[in-house]
Amino acid sequence: MSLSISQPDWAPTQDTPAIMLANLNHLGLIEVTGEQGRSFIQGQVTTDITSLAADQWRWGAHCDAKGKMLASFRAFVLQDSLFMLMPTSALAIDLPQLKKYSVFSKAELVDASANWQLIGIAGSDANTFVKQHFAEVSPETANEVTIVDGGLLLKDGQRFIAMLSPEKAQTICANQTIYSAAAWQALEIKAGYPNIPGIHANQYVPQMCNVQSINGISFTKGCYMGQETIARMKYRGGNKRALYILSGTSSQTLTEETVLEIALEGGYRRGGAIIEFVQQGDQVLLTAVLANDTEADATLRIAGDEESALTIMPLPYSLEA
């Protein structure tokens, strides 16, 4: 089933409506099953999968042997399956890499995206909406993960991600305005989340995208792919990058390949790369990897657009170790 978008446009600076349902068709799902499914993933990713309870979800990253991220994801469990939720462009790169090593384990990995409808639920009335449509959930005391009729709900602060059967999704979306994924991406950007697209695979160690600040790295679990680099960066230092939130204007159409420039003595220089963005007209909102000593009042712009201007916004979490 494909949800019909009745509100395709979203101004990045616009307030979230009282109830916002968004079609999260930019995200995909890897499903992991099998006797050794969870233990296999445990040895591949930064987060502690073996301690993940049925009512929890966690951020994590899957890295190459050099500690560079192939993908970042939300991990959670439904019955006997482990799911990894990530951008579809990252899934296309990450799943084949995981499968290369899973042949040595009793683990099955598949792209389960087509089996589920992903819906983002946000706004000041999100709790009320959830309570009305999911009898299993008491929003005020909801677990991070709640199994519901037709799927499950992930609770993220005052927002929810619903992973539902097509039939259940059709029921709850009836007579509702359905926003495009950009509306949800604006909220993800404001949360400072590292939704790494496939084009940036193998470029950044997790700490360069603040994965440690959102509880996406366990420094006490056993060995996993890229652990040596990630641990060294924590205990010996050396990380010179971080994920920033930027807001501003540009008449240029942005892409994931768009380069940012920063004003330094003597002119503008390459300043960083975009991770996730939304754009409506000349209004832009984005996350980008910049030097981690970039000042809050730094002057930034879009490369090739001298009239553009970007302002750094505060992160909603601390980067302190």
Image (cartoon, rainbow, N blue to C red):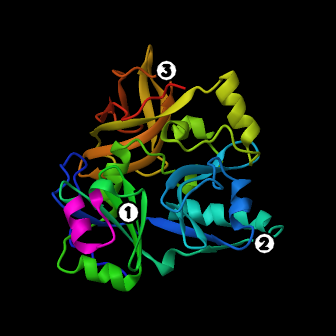
Above or below: residue 127 compared with residue 47: below
Q: In this view, does 8 lie to the left or right of 67?
A: left
Q: Give the residue type that dot 3 points to.
A: Asp
Q: Where is residue 319 in the image (x, y as percent from the top left)?
A: 48, 28
> For the residues carrying marks 3 and 2, which lies nearer the camera in this image?
2
Q: How far apart are the alpha carbons under marks 1 and 3?
A: 34 Å
Pick whichever, 244 or 30, lies toward us.
30
Which residue does the image show at 35% across and 54% down from the upper left?
185
Q: Give the residue type that dot 2 points to.
A: Lys
Q: Where is residue 88 in the image (x, y as percent from the top left)?
A: 51, 65
SS under mark 3: loop
Q: Please say whether residue 9 is one of the residues in the magenta stretch.
A: no
Which residue is disc 1 drawn over? 161
> For the residues carrying marks 1 and 3, which lies nearer the camera in this image?
1
Q: Which of marks 1 and 3 is nearer the N terminus?
A: 1
Which residue does the image show at 74% across and 53% down from the upper left?
43
Question: Which quadrant is home to the C terminus?
Answer: top right
Q: Where is residue 242 in the image (x, y as percent from the top left)?
A: 51, 32
Q: Is residue 73 left or right of residue 176?
A: right
Q: Where is residue 37 in the image (x, y as percent from the top left)?
A: 70, 67
Q: Please say whether residue 138 is one of the residues in the magenta stretch.
A: yes
Pick whichever, 256 or 86, lies toward us.
86
Which residue is disc 2 drawn over? 106
Q: Which of marks 3 and 2 is nearer the N terminus?
A: 2
Q: Is residue 96 left or right of residue 292?
A: right
Which residue does the image show at 63% across and 74% down from the upper left?
110
Q: Give the residue type that dot 1 points to.
A: Ile
The range drawn in magenta is 127-139
Q: Kindly check if marks 2 and 1 are in contact, taking CB atoms under 8 A apart as contact.
A: no
